[in-house]
Image: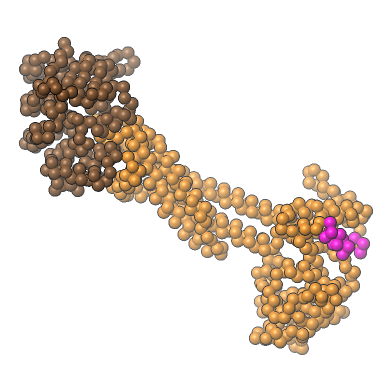
Chain colours: A brown, B orange
Amino acid sequence: MPTNIKPVTNADTSPVIDMTGIKKSFYIGTKNELEVLHGIDLTVMPGEFLSIVGQSGSGKSTLMNIIGLLDKPTSGSYILNSSDISLDSDEDTSHIRNKEIGFVFQTYNLIPRMSALKNIELPMLYAGVHGKARKERAEELLELVGMTERMQHTPDELSGGQKQRVAIARALSNNPSIILADEPTGALDSKTGHVIMDIFHKLNEEKGITVVLITHSHELASETQRIVTLSDGLFIDNPELSYSDNMTKGI
Amino acid sequence: MLLSENIKMAIHQLKANKLRTFLTMLGIIIGIASVIAIITVGDAMTKSVMNSLNSMGTNNIEFYLTSKSTTDKDGNVETTGVERDMKDSDYFTDKMMTSLKDSFGDRIAGISLSAELANGKATQGQKYARIAIKGLNSYALTQKKLTILAGAPISDRDQNASSKVALVSDRYVQNMYGQNADLKSVLAKHVEMVSGSSYYSYTIVGVYKYSEDQNKMMTGEASNGSGKNLQTDCYIPLSVAQQALHSDALYGDFTVIAGTTDDATQLKDDISKYLNQHFYENNDAYMADGYSMQADIKQSGEMMGTLKLAISAIAAISLLVGGIGVMNIMVVSITERTREIGTRKALGATNRSIKMQFIIEALVICLIGGIIGMILGSVIGIAISKMIGFVAVPSISSVVISLLFSMGFGVFFGYYPASKAAKMNPIDALRYE
């Protein structure tokens, strides 16, 4: 049973993400159609810190890909920052992704052999920002995540936590509408994971940046303002129940 | 994204893996270098051969008498005339020369006529010098392009008055009067030679510079004599030679120099036809025929061009192999960098900018390889040319061609891998291990 989970923030401003009836099917072979998302409604308001929780196979990766404009829904409407993006061409989608979405991946995905500074400059490069402005902005962001000292280091020379901090700075470089963080602490030890989470909290509270966290960990999710739980391609009403259900299943 | 950013990024990427980049470039370097080296040597050779052929006179058409014959369509020659020795009435005459000049006007720059009188030892007491006495008309003399070191060339007045004057070579003077003889001191002295029952004596009016190259080229044989006392030409007015030969202005052959605007081969055919129609129609045994070097030169030029092209084509195969090497490495590199491509797409790179990035990377490899290959090829080409004895100048065209070619190769062999990269699905690419 699909449920529209109401945002907690005030309703005066228009939502960053407004999804209705999002369905996604994959075709395996010729006949077997596999529907992964059965009609998702999701609204995210500016300045929210939201977490989407779900087990493997619940469809959260698919949903993240759709939110992040890496994939298109089979049906349903997706309005990002008041503009319907479901019909845009590949090239337009790339431009919107470049400007509106900041990705933070579990595996950091920094470009090897490029310095931290150059990595942060990359999204600005695709946006057509010129050399000097790009460098200044990148330095500013490195300072924000406390990595000024490591500006010229390549990913090989950085620890996991440091890499993720650079990745966060990179996600912020074009002032995106949302930061989409996919298991950002998944590859880190718990202590470093907390440092990273603290950065997200700081960005959300001090800068008012909208963060969508995708995770399977309820512990991490509980730190956020709002939790939506995805199970078998649908948001479920009672996260607590689902949580204990899954725990039972896990045992 | 700006082109300059793409180029910077490509160079950065190539620098990061220097050994691989160098090995990839090596194919292009060897390919371009071999093509350029062959073109350089080929050009030097062609130029030098053409120069020596041209100096022999592309515009010269030699006419001679031959037995009357017809050539059928298979190229078989059949004699149609009577078989007999030549008599005076068969030879070319001054009248024919005048008639040719009148009929062809500007198409003929001049007619050079000559008669070989005798050769042997000219003596002066105990000293001697080998000479060949040749009678030349004034046009034939100008065609020799002699450098006069002392005195003056044979004048038209001398020609018309049949003055017994002669031009001798500086070698002659050295042999006769010593190595350091003053060339001016021999002027007005006599060249004397006895050959058989004839005695020849002419007054020296000028000394020309003997050119071994010219002699070799003209006669087609190496200088006879062991260097020191070799035979050189002694030129006298044509009419003087004719008188000595007791022949009355009859020529077995003559050379027409075509006017600059005319095609020598065409002129040769026209003159042969004219002579045969007007003067040899009723001759029972002989007819006029001509030979122009132009056709030969053209043919040898074409042949050398074809040869150069054929060898270049073989060398170009190595260029092709190099190009495939670039493509191979690009495909490998793109597979290796799948995650990077996925990340770039997630960060907002369009398919076009991904494609551009990899094409530029291939282009930069090929262009740098092309430049190195061009320099290497020119150096090798010049060195080889020098070793064979030709002067090589690297041509602008080969520079332009090699640069364009290597850029073309970069785009051509970079296109497929780049398109492959551009078409990658970002979701799969991000998940690629």
Q: Quadrant of residue B202?
A: bottom right
Give the left or right position of residue B341, taking residue A189 as reference: right
Instruction: Report the magenta residues as a range.
Output: B88-103
Q: Is residue B400 above or below residue B60?
A: above
Measuring from the top left, give residue A140's x and y in whole percent.
Answer: 16, 43
Measuring from the top left, give residue B216's x and y in whole percent.
Answer: 68, 68
Measuring from the top left, give residue B326's x and y in whole percent.
Answer: 39, 43
Residue most toward the top?
A: A1
At 70% from the left and 82% from the top, the residue drawn is B173
Q: Is residue A175 above or below residue B372?
A: above
The reply to whether residue A160 is in sight is no
At 78% from the left and 65% from the top, the residue drawn is B112
Measuring from the top left, give residue A24's x and y in whole percent.
Answer: 25, 18
Q: Quadrant of residue A68?
A: top left
Q: Quadrant of residue B349?
A: top left
Q: Is residue B281 above or below residue A190?
A: below
Q: Quadrant of the N terminus of chain B?
A: top left
**Within the magenta stretch, is there residue A21?**
no
Q: Is residue B2 above or below residue B181?
A: above
Q: Quadrant of the C terminus of chain B?
A: top left
Give the left or right position of residue A207, taking residue B214 as reference: left
Give the left or right position of residue B13, taking residue B217 as reference: left
At 91% from the left and 52% from the top, the residue drawn is B281
Most foreground residue, B433 or A79:
A79
